[in-house]
């Protein structure tokens, strides 16, 4: 995981990461696929993905996991203009976050699912928000739910979809 963070930040060592600003590190952890997990090594000794992949590490009873429909957290690391600029370059964002995991045909299929013009009525911000939320939150949560269920736990998966008024 550290190597992924080094790759996304362009740093060559952990020492170089100390020179990166918080916004860069925060957005890079999202792109590396492990956002907002406090790895304190005391209470949470490993990333949940590794911890819960071994049934010996937990009691397989009942878990409730889920998230909000619109769960993009990337906007917290930048101003509105920066986020809009990123949305205008959404294809590059998807390419950079997916190309290390999927081949070009799969990345193109992913791009089709989040196409701002055909799926989101030309709204690049909505398309990017949905992609980021799915990539950083929704997909990992679904994967964790499947992993827990495979280990014998009863899992309740929720998606809170009501927009605030």
Image (tube, rainbow, N blue to C red):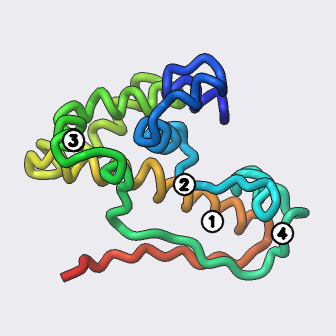
Callout 2: 10 Å neighbours few (<14), some, many (20+)?
few
User: x, y percentage for residue 144?
Assistant: 64, 60
Structural distance between the alpha carbons of marks 3 and 2: 27 Å
Comes first in the chain, label 3 or label 1 = 3
Comes first in the chain, label 4 or label 1 = 4
Comes first in the chain, label 1 or label 2 = 2
The residue to which callout 3 is attached is 115
Structural distance between the alpha carbons of marks 3 and 1: 27 Å
User: x, y percentage for residue 83?
Assistant: 23, 43
Task: Indicate left or right for 91 with 29 as reference.
Answer: left
Task: Indicate left or right for 79 with 16 as reference.
Answer: left
Of helix, strand and loop, which one carries label 1?
helix
> Which mark identifies residue 58?
4
Q: Nearer the viewer, residue 126 or 81?
A: 81
Comes first in the chain, label 3 or label 2 = 2
The residue to which callout 1 is attached is 145
- Residue found at the far front of this picture: 19
User: x, y percentage for residue 43?
Assistant: 78, 64
The residue to which callout 2 is attached is 36
Above or below, 144 against 124 in this view is below
Callout 4: 10 Å neighbours few (<14), some, many (20+)?
few
Structural distance between the alpha carbons of marks 2 and 4: 21 Å
Residue located at (27% from left, 30% from top): 91
- Contact, mark 4 vs mark 1 (Cβ under 8 Å): no
Quarter of the view holding residue 85: top left
- In the rendered image, the quadrant that contains the C terminus is bottom left
Comes first in the chain, label 2 or label 4 = 2
Structural distance between the alpha carbons of marks 4 and 3: 40 Å
- Residue found at the far right of this picture: 56
């Amino acid at each position: 995981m550290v190597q992924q963070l080094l790759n996304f930040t362009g740093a060559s060592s952990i020492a170089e990461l100390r020179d990166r600003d918080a916004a860069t590190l925060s957005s890079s952890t999202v792109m590396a696929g492990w956002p907002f997990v406090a790895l304190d090594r005391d209470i949470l000794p490993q990333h949940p993905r590794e911890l819960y992949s071994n049934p010996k590490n937990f009691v397989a009873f009942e878990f409730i996991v889920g998230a909000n429909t619109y769960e993009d957290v990337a906007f917290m690391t930048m101003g509105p203009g920066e986020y809009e600029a990123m949305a205008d370059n959404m294809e590059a964002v998807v390419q950079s976050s997916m190309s290390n995991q999927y081949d070009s045909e799969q990345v193109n299929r992913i791009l089709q699912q989040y196409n701002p013009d055909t799926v989101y009525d030309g709204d690049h911000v909505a398309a990017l928000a949905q992609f980021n939320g799915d990539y950083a939150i929704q997909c990992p949560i679904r994967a964790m739910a499947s992993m827990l269920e495979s280990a014998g736990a009863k899992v309740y998966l929720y998606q809170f979809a009501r927009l605030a008024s």
